Amino acid sequence: MATEENPVLTVEGLVGGYGNVTVLNGTSFSVPRGAITTVIGPNGAGKSTVFKAIFGLIDVRRGSITFEGKDVTRCSPAQLLKLGISYVPQGRNIFPELSVLHNLELGGYSAPAGVRMAERIESALQRFPMLRSKLHAQASTLSGGQQKLLEIARAMLLEPRLLLIDEPSIGLSPLMVQETFDILTEMRNRGVSVLMVEQNAKSALQRSDYGLVLESGETRLFGPAAEILADPRVGQLFLGGGISAPLVARPASRIH
């Protein structure tokens, strides 16, 4: 059951970026446990950057990241995987010349000793039957949507408690977008907390429990997805307007 009282992830005062360029300007938010939370915002808002900061791919200059009560601000991606966080980055991130099976096997490289990876792969193939029919084909022969499903299946082999997924709908047909959202909903129903960046704000919020709006590297709005979707300031933001003051970690219905 989704809950705001016991968040799976908490980000506080995060400042970071690339080299001398600051992208995140003190953003703070919590990710409700057992829910799909979608991060939206205009280009350059810091959506992908905050995911990279959470997953240890860029330096955090100030602030903290807490996962299930543990400070993970300085953890490496390998450490985060072992703790229960998986990350599906934007774009295609497969080994194109390897088979689907080999891609899945590589996804389990950081699994704890004693894990029966063959059983987990079989479970993934039951969940993603399309991959079974392509099991020995080169991953490069899969369609864009099939490759995205392969990435998600590979991430799920480690049985994460939190899945970060960045722009899952890029380059997909409308049918594959809906199938991908269906899979994320199924994961949520199995107890996986999902934090998703998505440019297709309307479709994503319609399938989410909570929404989070970033602008200029700061959290502007957070609340139930339906209320974020109905807030007129969200449409204004995407049309080039702005939200004048940060309104952090309050249900949208209480924002005035």
Image (tube, rainbow, N blue to C red):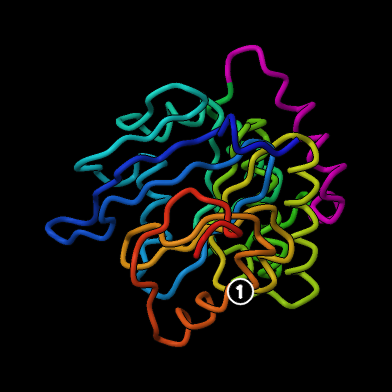
Q: Quadrant of residue 21?
A: bottom left
- State which region is magenta: 112-134
x then y, percent, for residue 34: 69, 38
Q: Which residue is mark 1?
A: 200
**Residue at image location 24% in from the left, 50% down from the top:** 16
Amino acid type at image mark 1: Asn
x then y, percent, for residue 81: 51, 31
Residue 7 appears in the picture as rendered = yes
x then y, percent, for residue 135: 78, 49
Name the foreground residue: 190 vs 114: 190
> The residue tagged with tag 1: helix, strand or loop?
loop
Name the foreground residue: 33 vs 135: 33
Q: Is residue 119 above or below residue 139?
A: above
Name the foreground residue: 185 vs 138: 185
Task: Name the quarter where the N terminus is drawn.
Answer: top right
The verdict on residue 128 being magenta is yes
**Residue at image location 75% in from the left, 43% down from the top:** 187
Residue 96 appears in the picture as rendered = no
Q: Is residue 241 above or below residue 194?
A: below
x then y, percent, for residue 212: 52, 58
Left or right for 67, reference 35? left
Q: Is residue 85 above or below residue 173?
A: above
The verdict on residue 222 being magenta is no
Farthest residue to the bottom: give it.
239
Left or right for 148, reference 51? right
